[in-house]
Amino acid sequence: MDREVNATVSPSSDEPSAPVLRLKLFGQMEAWVDGRALVLPRSRKARGLLAVLTVSAPASVLRPTLWRLLWSQRGADQARGSLRQALHDLAECLAPITPSLLRADRFAVALNADGILADVHELARATAERPEPLALIQGEFLEELSGLDPAFDKWLAIERRRLGDAARQIARAALLQQTEPDAVITAADRLLTLDPTHEDAWRALMRAHAERGERALVVELYARCKKVLADLLKTAPSPETEAIVADIRWAEQSGGILRPNSNIRTPGRLLGRGIRVAVLPPRDIGQETDPSLSVGLAEEITTALARFRHISVLSDLSISRLEAETGSVGLDIRQQGFGFILDGTVQKSRGRVRVMMRLLDLRASGEAIWVQRFDHEADDLLSLQDQIAGQIAAQVDTALLMQAGPNGYQANGSSRNGADGPSADLTAEDLVLQAVPCIYQLDRDAFNRAGDLLRRAVALDPQDAAAHGWLACWNIFLIGQGWAESSTEAMRRAGAAAERAVALDPTDARGLTIAGHVRAFLYGRLEEARALHSRAIVANPNLPLAWVLSGLTQSYRGEHDEALRLVRQAIKLSPLDPHSYFFDMALMIAHLMKGDFDTVVNIGHRAIELNPWFSSTLKAQIAALGHLGLRAEIEEIRAKLVQIEPDFSVQRALATMRHVRPEDRLLYETGLRLAGIH
């Protein structure tokens, strides 16, 4: 490509003070300024022109190069005229940002590098020591512009190959620099996102998880690697990859002892990080005994719980291996560092199955902190085991988050609190566990304390993905409640924390779905949000939060029936969830946009009773009451809302509303005005 090179301006990593055009070129092309989405030119040729100038910036591009690239099948005069029209369209689009962003003369065209920041520019600054910008590669480069022009397609193929090769090279170099399992996992996941057939990355990922004691996950990763290689390359894993799985299976058969010349550098421990839970097979007390049902259910529960990053699971099989390894029978689980036991009973009778499960807190002399009964038809036992295990995992996760942290316990169950309060030797994980219940209480003092705990956790361990993810979640609530001193600054913090969480652990469902909610609720980037929520649900289909936040994004898009389906799945997983007021809020919003005002009010009564301090619930309720004209109830809700958010107004409500359909926005605005909100 012919270019006139101007003086190169090195982009600064600092946030610029002047308005900056931010461009997303990977995946669906998008643009925004100061957090507001910008409408790109309608013409695909004008978008292609913007893309070429962006990639070339700060260098200028000769006009003949541009028209030969975008209008190669037209005559010279017609192509020049088309270029002039495309430049006019592009200039009109960019003028509201700054008149000097697009520079054009008789010979060449360029973009002012100081006024533009694109993902492709950030990617160019990635190095093996600083590979984080590689996370910006989300989708194919300029995927919507394929087929624009034969000459442009050739340029696009070259750019895709160049960018892809450079990204893979950096990701591979970054992986080779890592030695600690957590860092290896992050780097290997990053490389596999760019190249899912990179078998070295699969092996590094499997070895790292083995060293963390996550043997079941290693076998799952091997199955995924095998499928990817078969689907994309029509080949099978190499003997070196097969050897890693063989090592794991050997260890499972030999009580955790690795065979000589193992592919795993250090013996993986059966005891992992996180809240430690021992899962015992439910006792079969039914008239129709079926030992396989109890064992199968225990294995399904173990697998489902293992999807939650903060839970380390010990199965009955692992207990047997530990007994063999230690030479003791009747192993004391508490001495092995486990704070919780999940056990129960199963009955099968007359075509039905009843499962009773309980979670025992060994820190409190075996007190049952969660008990639930599941009754189902026994027509398909395999599907039944999967369904019940998913519900158990979802509910146990919540119970553990509510119980493991508030009293100052370590993740592994020992107390660290003294008479003077929490000890200074708490880990980042301990601090996160203490913060989570305080977030959902929405008591102002407790909520602020949660923020302090999460900031301490991030400072203590900057590599803890969960700490960054929950800090992003905390900032979202801060904005939603109207408590942020600066919404812009809180949005920046939430965005940075969410992106960091995903970069540190790209397969953690909770981090993915929180990052998706940041994209949707704070920035209105709904397609990106939908993709992240989908990834989260695939990573952990038993995480209610992922279903709820995915439902909210669908409601923002105007897909209210789909939103209701997704939120109801969350409720099905955890019908008695202590955070069900959040689930109810999502139901209320979808029903409100469908005009089901009576349904909104009925759900609102229940949600407000569970937590009267969640402002989003109150806002949906007052809008529905406005449409129904129920003045007495309106005044009661307004009084509550004023206590939480004294400055609430129609203007503030619409400014934070992410629904894209004009009729949805009008319906909400009308309800608020009918309720007397101005």
Image (spheres, rainbow, N blue to C red):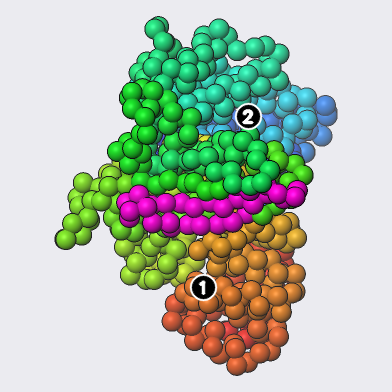
Residue 234 or residue 298, whichever sits in front? 298
- Which callout, 1 or 2, points to the residue nearer the camera? 1
Question: Can residue 516 be seen by looking at this rendering?
Answer: no
Pick whichever, 619 or 571, lies toward us.
Answer: 571
Residue 77: quadrant of the picture: top right
- Mark 2 highlights which residue? 62
Most distant residue in the left direction: 420
Quadrant containing the C terminus in the rendered view: bottom right
Classify mark 1: residues with Cα within 10 Å, few (<14), some (14-19) or many (20+). some
Q: Quadrant of residue 592?
A: bottom right
Q: Amino acid at mark 2?
A: Leu
What is the C-alpha distance between the residues marked 1 and 2? 65 Å
* Residue at 38% over, 27% down: 322
Q: Secondary structure at mark 2?
A: strand
Q: Position of residue 193 (x, y in %)?
A: 56, 29
Disc marking residue 136: none
x and y, in percent, of residue 272 in the image = 38, 34
Tell whether 203 sits left or right of 162. left
Mark 2 residue crowding within 10 angstroms, few (<14) / some (14–19) / many (20+) = many
Image vertical order of residue 47 relative to residue 183, above or below: below
Report if residue 107 lies within the magenta region.
no
**Which residue shows up at 55% across the image and 7% down it?**
239
Range of residues picked out in magenta: 346-374
Q: Amino acid at mark 1?
A: Leu
Which comes sooner in the sequence, label 1 or label 2? 2
Marks 1/2 in contact by CB < 8 Å: the verdict is: no
Indicate the secondary structure of the residue bearing disc 1: helix
The answer to whether residue 609 is visible is yes
Q: Looking at the image, which residue is at 77% across and 44% down?
A: 379
Question: Residue under circle 1?
Answer: 610
Residue at x 36% of width, y 29% of height: 329
